[in-house]
Image: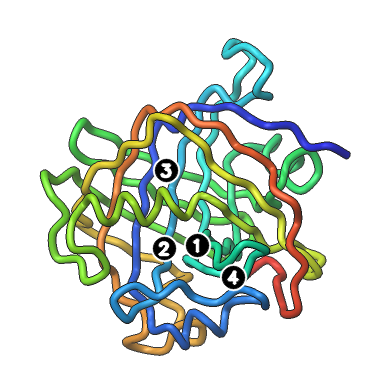
């Protein structure tokens, strides 16, 4: 079945980023993916995303839907037909939307679990907390806007961080079958991110010592995107030679 392109508005996107020991990140990746290394570190994190006006690209905004979503991500590279390509590997996606959970992997790429979200927003600060329905994953993050990116060992400034994430627009998601990855690409002509400062962050995914041994995953920085129109282009599935099943 041909999967439709989707249009939406990124009403709010928090990218909470961790610097990770490359060997720890590599253990979580199926072949042919490998960690994308920046200044000696792998880059991983959580994307906390509120989408509005989600609809097929041909449909008017009046038919669009709204949802809270989360994706745990690891920046990756792989050998493509024209050289090395970059993007993100997504071991799990979660959503507040019953429709997204049903349609993901059927109507559009990306299988989703269900989660309850708690969101508190002010002009200069955002808190997003979630708990998945199966009880496996919890996140609680508070980020405030900042005039510049401070304290990051991954990126020298906001411009470098912005380029890195804009270039990693291809996302490949784990599937229940474990035999392939679903692919989706974010496209926009209005890319813009702001620096954030993490006031608090808890993640059962990154705080798990079995997944990330002590000292191998350290909170690094945050970025904020708001009110950006985007399109989502389905990509061909990627065959895997390793365990690509959805993370618990």
The quarter of the picture where residue 5 lies is: top right
Considering depth in this image, is 69 or 189 the residue closer to the camera? 189
**Residue assigned mark 1:** 73
Question: Which residue matches tag 4?
Answer: 78
Which one is closest to the eye, mark 4 or mark 1?
A: 4
Distance between the alpha carbons at the discs numbered 4 and 2: 19 Å
Q: Is residue 166 above or below residue 187?
A: below
Labels 2 and 1 touching (C-beta < 8 A): yes
Q: CA distance from mark 1 to mark 3?
A: 21 Å
- Tell me the residue that label 2 is attached to: 45
Pointer 3: what residue? 118
Q: Position of residue 159 (x, y in %)?
A: 23, 50
Q: CA distance from mark 2 to mark 1?
A: 5 Å
Percent x, y of residue 66: 54, 27
Residue displayed at 56% across by 52% down: 170
- Residue 48 at x, y percent in the picture: 43, 48
- 70 relative to 55, above or below: below
């Amino acid at each position: 079945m041909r999967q439709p392109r989707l249009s939406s508005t990124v009403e709010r996107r928090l990218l909470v980023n961790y610097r990770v020991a490359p060997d720890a990140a590599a253990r979580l990746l199926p072949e042919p993916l490998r960690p994308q290394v920046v200044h000696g570190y792998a880059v991983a994190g959580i994307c906390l995303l509120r989408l509005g006006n989600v609809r097929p690209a041909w449909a008017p905004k009046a038919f669009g839907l709204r949802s809270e979503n989360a994706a745990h991500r690891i920046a990756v590279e792989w050998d493509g037909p024209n050289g090395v390509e970059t993007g993100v590997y997504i071991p799990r996606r979660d959503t507040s939307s019953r429709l997204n959970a049903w349609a993901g992997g059927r109507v559009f790429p990306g299988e989703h679990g269900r989660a309850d979200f708690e969101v508190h927003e002010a002009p200069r600060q955002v808190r997003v907390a979630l708990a998945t329905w199966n009880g496996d994953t919890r996140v609680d993050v508070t980020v405030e806007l900042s005039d510049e990116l401070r304290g990051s060992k991954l990126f020298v400034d906001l411009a470098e961080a912005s380029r890195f994430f804009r270039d990693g627009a291809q996302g490949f998601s784990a599937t229940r079958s474990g035999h392939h990855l679903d692919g989706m690409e974010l496209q926009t002509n209005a890319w813009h991110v702001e620096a954030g400062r993490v006031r608090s962050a808890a993640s059962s995914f990154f705080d798990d010592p079995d997944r990330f041994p002590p000292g191998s995953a350290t909170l690094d920085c945050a970025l904020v995107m708001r009110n950006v129109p985007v399109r989502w282009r389905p990509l061909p599935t990627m065959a895997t030679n390793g365990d690509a099943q959805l993370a618990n």
